[in-house]
Amino acid sequence: MREKVLPVLTVVLGILALWYLAAIPMNVREALTAAERAGAVVEGGSATERQQLPALRLVLLNPALALEGAWTQDRPRLPAPHQVAAELWSSVAGQPPGSNRSLLRHAGITLGATLAGFAIGSLAGILLAVGIVHNRAMDLSVMPWAIISQTIPIVALAPMIVVVLNSVGVQGLLPKAVISAYLSFFPVAVGMVKGLRTPDPMQIDLMRTWNASRAQIFWLLRLPASVPYLFASLKVAVAAALVGTIVGELPIQRGGLGARMLAGSYYGQTTQIWAALVMAAVLAAALVWFMGFLERRTLRAMGVPA
Amino acid sequence: MRATATTLPERDSPVIAAKDVSLVFGTADGPVQALRDVTLSVGAGEFVSFIGPSGCGKTTFLRCVAALETPTSGTLTVNGMDPDAARRARAYGYVFQAAGLYPWRTIEGNVRLPLEIMNYPKAEQAERVARVLEMVELSGFARKYPWQLSGGMQQRASIARALAFDAPILLMDEPFGALDEIVRDRLNEELLRLWARTGKTTLFVTHSIPEAVYLSTRIVVMSPRPGRITDIIESPLPRERPLEIRDTPEFLAIAHRVREGLRAGHVEV
């Protein structure tokens, strides 16, 4: 346990230190403006002249003022970690869970759409892979399209999916789930094609000597052989599904972490954006961890040495 | 070519009958003749070894018998049927060089696999698995996973798997090729005992002269480019063979003849 905690802690502390440092030049202009307004003497000329100077130069000219105002502003360019933590706490614990201001509520909305999209996407990916492995025409025709589908920027595609689905009367969770599935089917399809093809010719020959049917070869050999590949791609897919959902929430604006981030950027609430971002990261970590947990359980049941 | 199969005594209703079997593979570098005019007949209960250098077609011939390859000319029958019909009738068990056990199945699960595929009733599956595991002395390891077993034990499990559905023919393609000499000796001894007990017609591909001589009632010497039979040697050794038989003059004489046959095949190239 200790071997694990120490390196992780070191990295976290390093990131926090960098973050606090970066907040000084990032927030120096607003800090100096506020200090000037409060009557302090600011080096570097008037407000307009200061616009021409690089942020680091301003910090060096006014070290005390820059430090004083770096981590305490109401609307900083880069909020300090403790400000994000405070915002996170107040929007999680300080709000009734049903409230529109509750980050928990938004996280729940995002989680629901993510899970739905992940389920649709993984299922589609598995079915595609089964088709590709068993059908030569699909093998030659489907993969190029699947690859092309992933080269289209999802941010450009998401609003169109929303509009098209809306025009046929599909609203709510489903459009977001579709966007999320669009991102998550691909890793699953690629991983499963690889996994279903792992059995070597000898193992297929062995099945032939027993006169096994194609269905038996699939269920008894190909599918179990693909399980490690399936879980590796599910971990990628679940993270991609979360990204897809958040992107989908930008144009829809009916709650969710994506909506929260966009609202924050409309109103200059950087702390709110960062809080939503941290929440999204926590969610992603939890989802990936859960997939890893399922993987360990499944592989242990399949006799893989722990 | 020193001897052709035409000099063989005629056998009544051979289990495996090959007449002028040839097989040409089309490769990127042009056609490769893997087998030329292989004529051989194997009677019930025989133990026939195929020996020769790489590329002599010994494995290819075994795969033809198993209907994993199809000869381009000649006739080949297995149990009186064409090989593919015999395969569909599950006439043989095949043992590859690699044990090829499924890592996600226990030893008994692996041995049970062909029985599941062939839809044996559950109770009979269990009874057969127990019986063949006992035959290869792996009864205590039924619940272990393959990675928990040594290479030799894994290969024994794969032999048990080939025996589980009691096919009359056993095809073995260098089953002990990847094992060390000591393990190999023990498995050879066990295989002989197994063969005596089950009476299965066995075709056995090997690189090893002592192994071929020790195990077989008949040794087929093959040579490459094109793959063909250069000699067929009837073994005068008794069926009961302790490992020490390998030091007897009879044994050494056969081994010598096999070596000569292999050398003759090489000179022709």
Image (cartoon, coloured by chain):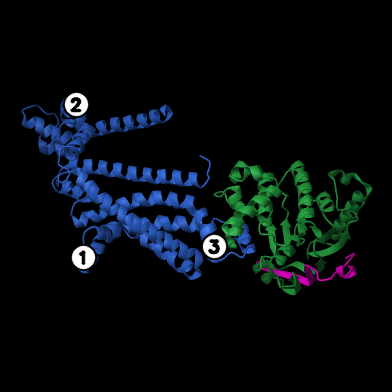
Q: Secondary structure at mark 1?
A: helix
Marks 3 and 1, how far apart at CA: 43 Å
The dot on residue A216 is: 3
The tint of chain B in the picture is green
Q: Comparing marks 2 and 3, which lies closer to the viewer? A: 3
Marks 2 and 1, how far apart at CA: 54 Å
Q: Secondary structure at mark 2?
A: helix
Is disc 2 in contact with disc 3, using a CB cutoff of under 8 Å? Answer: no
Q: Earlier in the sequence, mark 2 or mark 1?
A: 2
Residue in front for this viewpoint, A88 or A35: A88
The tint of chain A in the picture is blue
Q: Earlier in the sequence, mark 3 or mark 1?
A: 1
Residue A296, placed above or below residue B196 = above
Seen at 50% across and 57% down, the residue is A223
Using residue B195 as the reference point, say whether residue A167 is left or right of it: left
Seen at 20% across and 30% down, the residue is A59
The dot on residue B175 is: none
Residue where numbered disc 2 is placed: A63
Q: Secondary structure at mark 3?
A: helix
Q: Is residue B20 magenta?
A: yes
On the same chain, marks 2 and 1? The answer is yes
Parent chain of label 1: A
Q: Earlier in the sequence, mark 2 or mark 3?
A: 2
Q: Quadrant of residue A202?
A: bottom right
Q: Comparing marks 2 and 1, which lies closer to the viewer? A: 1
Residue B243, placed above or below residue B226 = above
**Amino acid type, callout 2:** Pro
Residue B151, percent across and down? 67, 44
Q: Quadrant of residue A179?
A: bottom left
Residue in front for this viewpoint, B207 or A219: A219
Using residue A174 as the reference point, say whether residue A126 is left or right of it: right
